[in-house]
Amino acid sequence: MPRNASETSSPLRFTVGYLFFTGLFVLLTLILLFFMEHGENSAVTGTAGANSPIMPCIVLDAGHGGEDGGAVGVDGLLEKTVNLKVAQMLQDMFRLAGIPVVMTRTEDKMLNDPDAAVSGKRKMTDLRSRLKLVQGTPEGILVSIHMNSFSQAQYCGLQVYYSSNHENSVILAETVQKQVKTHLQPDNNRNIKPADSSIYLLAHCDRPAVLIECGFLSNPDECAKLGNDEYLGELSTVIFSAICHYLSPDGSMS
Ligand SMILES: [Zn+2]
């Protein structure tokens, strides 16, 4: 069933352990209370008035969609499908925490110009639509979700790319990368990377913006994990936690 940002209720799609999630939620509540009280000092808030901070809005971008399946896993798993699952899990968590969230897509489709005749043109108009949504979202923070792939199967692990157009992007990227190493992938020694011009959204977005390559579909073990909803719930929870750390008043709680 199609989903959109205006829906108010939906079944939760993540299956993380109850204790872990409860502990996390208590932490988030404390962060949010502090954020609401001291939001005017936060690097990611604006000031509409002396004590009326503007809440940031997380723009969740599930990469690819429709005719653009993205990377293909060793077992046939499509990147576009995993991207959307993770984005929807994150959407649920942000809603629960009362943090504004917008999705670039909630269905298996591209956001392209329907009149574009060739594939390359459709892909470009799709990316432009996503960029327009981010740029048009007040206090928007872009979190683009993707899965990686490489010709050699041994490579694995999450890696975050960031936009060089906004100074906060690198802070957000570092926070996500660090939280994942601490709580999900202790052997992950990857470093964050600045996006080059090949990552259109990050190259053109002037908001805080990161693209998270959540794992390698070309690695059999990691591909199996990315096909498992329970693992995706854990992955989404850690990403959510990292973004909440970033949103804390000085972004330094991580
Ligand atoms: Zn991708």
Image (spheres, rainbow, N blue to C red):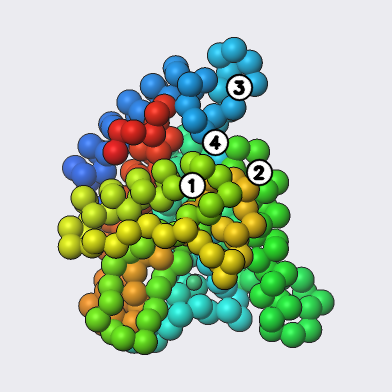
Residue at (36, 28) in percent of width and height: 31
Relative to 249, is 130 on the left or the right? right
On residue 137, the disc is 2
Q: Indicate which disc, 2 or 4, sits on the residue closer to the N terminus.
A: 4
Viewer-nearest residue: 179 or 94: 179
Q: CA distance from mark 4 to mark 3?
A: 11 Å
Q: Is residue 158 above or below residue 90?
A: below
> Whole-percent x and y of residue 1?
55, 63
Q: Quadrant of residue 76?
A: bottom left
* Residue 208 visible, this orientation: yes
Label 2 SS: loop
Relative to 220, is 101 on the left or the right? right
Q: Which residue is mark 3?
A: 47
Q: Which residue is mark 4?
A: 56
Q: Which residue is mark 1?
A: 169
Please name the amino acid that badge 4 sits on.
Pro
Relative to 143, is 155 on the left or the right? left
Q: CA distance from mark 2 to mark 1?
A: 16 Å
Q: Indicate which disc, 3 or 2, sits on the residue closer to the N terminus.
A: 3
> Whole-percent x and y of residue 16?
26, 53
Label 4 SS: loop
Labels 2 & 4 near each other (Cβ < 8 A): no
Please name the amino acid that badge 3 sits on.
Thr
Q: Indicate which disc, 4 or 3, sits on the residue closer to the N terminus.
A: 3
On residue 183, the disc is none
Viewer-nearest residue: 227 or 190: 190
Q: CA distance from mark 4 to mark 1?
A: 14 Å
